Image (spheres, helix red, strand yellow):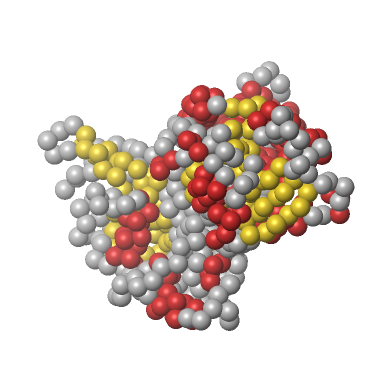
């Protein structure tokens, strides 16, 4: 086999060894003849201390997969036989693993370090595949006395490594694996519990969610519920029991981890779906009717979700009528600054102009690197909207202060809202608001959002920032910008032996502090920070109810 790339996935675990991988599917996950490394980051493992009692230890682990057909068929997983020189589980088969040190910035950083130390593979040889859920266990016997496959060079901690069919891995004495090996593997290989058909459906859905950078959080949340629906329809329906319910919840957990920046909307939609499913399971209907009833309920949920924009639009028009339109003199037009591409924003703006009978002066930032602002402008200018009275002016992102001059409102969407009311939205949102505060201090900052985008309790800085390929920024330089080739060459030659001299950052989202927001316009009305905090607490409780004991 030619050596291809290795792909790994971060996975939280709680033992010496990783648990099941979950979350986003790598962009190249299903293409060609490739090796993929799936990594796991284990959460605390509890082991007896030498003085008695229990000592807590956190471990990160990584599974390495080879997918010859690109779709999971004939997949193989690498297990490494631990050497006689390690202190635990000598001569046992295990994934790559190591303790999470105090100075490690994350379990993922631990996993990357251990992969490099124990196999010689570097970040250029691997790519994140997915993230699994942590678990813990106690081992009373713990103290008993670019490169591809050819690039793996094991260190002193291992004697050798072998490739296995993931479904052949077991915990028998004859197989010779470390404790909880199957419990770890099943968390990164959905087919182990779901079966090949449902596992393939889940993996395909995760990939679609992870790679979609065109649709907003609402559309991705709908896709998440559709993925869960399709997985359930593909599962073995002969045994609807506690194990089936556990598999459904684990699939749902994987779906919720796929896009961290959009995770609040996805998680809210998915836990609502799980609540519907649980209600059906607890009813007195025959087991054979459970899946058809679940499919029907989830389709109804999707139908209801598609009507949220109409409710937001009604609240938005009412807010403009009472807070933006001047009542003491005729209003010739309303000037609005916005950015990015949001179907909710375009529908609300068009609806406001029609319902209020006031022309709109729409100022739209281009929203690099994907230029979603241009997409938004094109949607507004569609022939169907020819009768609506508005003008559109496009500005470069660097022209935010000019675009904000004398505006009446800054209208933005939200991909996530923290429990304190801070809003995560497309990069450029904060500069637009800061420009408005200077150029049009009396203007209103209005957030249009479904309540599903409210995150569980936590500060804004605790939510991850989604970084994307620097090539999306650099494409616009090629052939147009003097010196662009120098930057690209510097990035290409950077490796572990030479320090980083240049970095190109491509963050998609940033946080807007709640103190800058005048109104949260939602599908459930005009909300306050107190309303948001209450919903945040609820989503935290619901998330724990369905996922905490997995």
Q: Is residue 185 visible in this depiction of the protein?
A: no
The picture places residue 498, in percent across and down from the top left corner, at 31, 75
- Image-based side of 392 in relation to 396, left or right: right
Picture layout, residue 310 above or below residue 113: above
The picture places residue 369, in percent across and down from the top left corner, at 58, 63
Q: How many marks?
A: 0
Picture layout, residue 129 above or below residue 299: below
Q: Is residue 8 visible in this depiction of the protein?
A: yes
The picture places residue 440, in percent across and down from the top left corner, at 57, 44
- Image-based side of 375 in relation to 70, left or right: right
- Image-based side of 460 in relation to 118, left or right: right
Most foreground residue, 306 or 187: 306
The answer to which quarter of the image holds residue 79 is bottom left
Picture layout, residue 314 above or below residue 97: above
- Image-based side of 374 in relation to 380, left or right: left
Most foreground residue, 276 or 169: 276
Picture layout, residue 298 above or below residue 91: above
Q: Residue at x 79, y 55 (%)?
A: 381
Extreme residue in the top direction: 284
Q: Residue at x 78, y 40 (%)?
A: 358
Most foreground residue, 270 or 193: 270
Extreme residue in the front direction: 329
Q: Residue at x 44, y 43 (%)?
A: 463
The answer to which quarter of the image holds residue 294 is top right
The picture places residue 493, in percent across and down from the top left corner, at 39, 79
Q: Residue at x 51, y 73 (%)?
A: 4
């Amino acid at each position: 086999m030619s050596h291809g790339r290795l792909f790994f996935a971060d996975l939280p675990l709680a033992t010496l060894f990783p648990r099941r991988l979950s979350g986003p599917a790598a962009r190249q996950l299903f293409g060609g003849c490739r090796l993929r490394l799936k990594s796991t980051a284990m959460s605390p493992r509890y082991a007896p201390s030498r003085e008695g009692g229990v000592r807590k230890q956190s471990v990160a682990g990584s599974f390495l997969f080879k997918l010859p057909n690109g779709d999971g068929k004939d997949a193989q997983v690498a297990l490494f036989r631990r050497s006689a020189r390690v202190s635990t589980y000598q001569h046992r088969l295990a994934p790559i693993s190591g303790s999470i040190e105090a100075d490690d910035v994350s379990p993922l950083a631990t996993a990357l370090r251990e992969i490099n130390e124990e196999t010689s593979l570097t970040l250029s040889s691997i790519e994140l595949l997915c993230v699994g859920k942590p678990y813990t266990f106690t081992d009373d016997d713990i103290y008993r006395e670019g490169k591809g496959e050819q690039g793996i060079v094991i260190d002193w901690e291992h004697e050798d490594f072998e490739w296995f069919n993931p479904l052949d891995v077991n915990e028998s004495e004859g197989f010779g694996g470390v404790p909880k090996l199957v419990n770890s593997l099943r968390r990164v290989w959905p087919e182990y519990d779901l079966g090949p058909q449902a596992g393939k459906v889940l993996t395909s859905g995760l990939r679609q969610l992870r790679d979609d950078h065109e649709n907003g959080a609402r559309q991705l949340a709908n896709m998440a519920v559709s993925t869960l629906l399709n997985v359930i329809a593909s599962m073995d329906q002969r045994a609807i029991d506690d194990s089936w319910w556990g598999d459904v919840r684990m699939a749902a957990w994987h779906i919720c981890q796929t896009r961290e920046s959009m995770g609040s909307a996805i998680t809210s939609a998915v836990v609502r779906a799980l609540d519907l499913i649980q209600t059906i399971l607890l009813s007195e209907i025959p087991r054979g009717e459970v899946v058809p009833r679940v499919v029907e309920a989830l389709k109804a949920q999707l139908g209801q979700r598609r009507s949220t924009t109409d409710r937001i639009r009604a609240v938005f028009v009412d807010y403009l009528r009472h807070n933006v339109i001047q009542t003491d003199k005729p209003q010739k037009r309303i000037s609005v600054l916005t950015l990015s591409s949001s179907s909710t924003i375009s529908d609300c703006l068009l609806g406001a102009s029609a319902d209020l009978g006031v022309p709109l002066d729409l100022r739209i930032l281009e929203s690099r690197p994907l230029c979603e602002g241009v997409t938004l402008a094109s949607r507004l200018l569609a022939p169907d909207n020819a009768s609506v009275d508005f003008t559109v002016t496009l500005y470069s992102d660097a022209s935010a202060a000019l675009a904000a001059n004398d505006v009446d409102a800054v209208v933005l969407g939200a991909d996530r809202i923290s429990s304190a009311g801070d809003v995560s939205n497309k990069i450029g949102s904060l500069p637009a608001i800061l420009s408005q505060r200077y150029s049009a201090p009396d203007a209103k900052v209005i957030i249009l959002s479904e309540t599903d985008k409210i995150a569980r309790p936590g500060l804004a800085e605790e939510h991850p920032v989604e970084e994307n390929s620097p090539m999306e920024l650099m494409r616009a330089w090629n052939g147009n910008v003097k010196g662009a080739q120098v930057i690209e060459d510097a990035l290409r030659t950077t490796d572990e032996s030479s320090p980083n001299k240049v970095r190109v950052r491509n963050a998609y989202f940033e946080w807007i502090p709640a103190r800058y927001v005048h109104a949260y316009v939602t599908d459930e009305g005009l909300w306050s920070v107190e309303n948001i905090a209450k919903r945040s607490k609820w989503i935290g409780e619901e998330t724990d109810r369905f996922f905490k004991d997995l």
